[in-house]
Image (cartoon, helix red, strand yellow):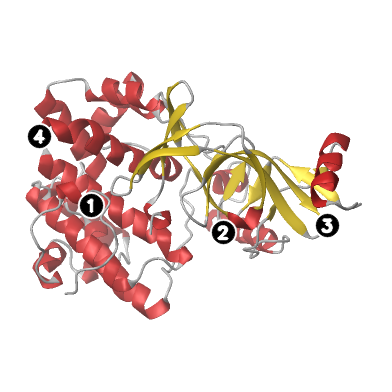
Amino acid sequence: MRKSSWPKLFPSLETSELGDLEDFVLSSDIFKEEQLVQNTDADFRRSVETMQSKKLEMNTVMHLTMAVLASELDVDFYAQCQQYFQAWTLPKARSESLCGMFCAKRKEANKAAGTFKATASEGLSLYSLFGFMLVQVVAPLVKCSNVIKAYTGLVNVIELIQAIPLDKCNADELRYAISFFLDACLAAGYRGFFHPKFHWQLHMPSQLARFKRMPSCWVHERKHKVAKRFGAPMANTAAFERSLLLEVIGHQMAELKENYVFDTSARLDKACKASQKMKQFLQDYMGRLSDDIQTCARAHLSPAGQCQKADVVLLKHGLVIGEVYFHATFGDRVLSLLSLWEKQTFEACKGCGVFKKQHAPMLVDTADIACALPFCHLKGDMYRVFVPLAYRR
């Protein structure tokens, strides 16, 4: 198998050269394809019993990582993580509390559940920064190297999957990343904790090669807000499932008829009237008058993502980072006023750099903004900024 050209997120932790993908197919021995099809309650019950017999209740890499590090380092690793993540600021679109995921209450809940409990949004906000912390803080202690390799392998896979809509990941690169991750999990002793999702990864590269995109399945769990919205007051218990399904589908169909649902261009989220001061500034800068000047604190980026006022963002051309002052439209143009920061250092392998905050305003097309970035304050005007893998290529 060809070794891919994409930059490894943590090259200092690489293992020796991997063999062919067939070496990792052993993970599929745990669950066969037919076991993934649950036709009846009896089928599902047998599957649950199989998982319980294999002790798959501890089924997340995150939970295993936390448990091993707490044991090997002999510290309250939850408390250490809580303190570390207090310094980090997420983009405004992310409302999750990183340090809140490691509070004492969550620690006890995770211990009782035998897993690291987190929503999908929390996981997406945490995974890359937690990986950076492992490399930056834990790896220099020369302990738990196999555990760190396994987790950082997971980070690489998630990063590449998120790079697919940007056309920055191909099937070979994804196949290599998944192989690296599974190999690292085996080295860390996780084979007994493999469950169907570990096996399903092996299908992702072929799906990407066939469809050029990753197929998505939109599901509603029993606690999902849309399902609860229609299910809680429903009185038709004789046909509850059908009634709930019709309500949810109707809700989704109505949302699909909204404007801009499939629009990938840069635009304001909810345009409103700009202040006289902003109008005057834009007209002076552009050198002409306009009756069509609107603003919004939040803007949608192209082809995906969003950023808000006070976010730290990355531009598409070069390693240029700045703080958002405002978004506005001027005629048919969507513009953002940024204050550019001065680069001090940047380690591409870790995706992290130190930048100096300064007042250097520049008006740019919002379409030139790549993404919003998490950052943490170091001292004075110095900030550490984390750049996702897709935008380091």
Q: Residues within 10 Å of mark 1 (few under 14, many from 20)?
A: many
Residue at 31% from the left image edge and 72% from the top image edge: 171
Image quarter of the N terminus: bottom left
Q: Residue 267 appears in which quarter of the rendering? A: bottom right
Residue denoted by label 3: 331
Amino acid type at image mark 1: Gly
Q: Looking at the image, is mark 1 or mark 3 earlier in the sequence?
A: 1
Q: Nearer the viewer, residue 383 or 36?
A: 383
Q: Which mark is residue 142?
A: 4
**Front: mark 1 or 4:** 4
Query: Label 4 sits on what residue type?
Result: Val
Compared with 175, 85 (above or below) is above
Q: CA distance from mark 1 to mark 2?
A: 38 Å
**Where 97 falls versus 164 (above or below)?**
above
* Kind of element beneath mark 4: loop
Q: Position of residue 309 (x, y in %)?
A: 64, 37
Q: Residue at the spot x=63%, y=65% of the render?
A: 262
Q: Which of marks 4 and 1 precedes in the sequence?
A: 4
Looking at the rendered image, the disc whose residue lies closer to the viewer, 2 or 3, is 3
Q: Residues within 10 Å of mark 3 (few under 14, many from 20)?
A: few
Q: CA distance from mark 1 to mark 3?
A: 46 Å
Residue that numbered label 1 is attached to: 153
In the picture, measured across the screen, residue 91 lies left or right of residue 62, that is: right
Q: Which mark is residue 348?
A: none
Q: Which residue is farthest bottom?
A: 210
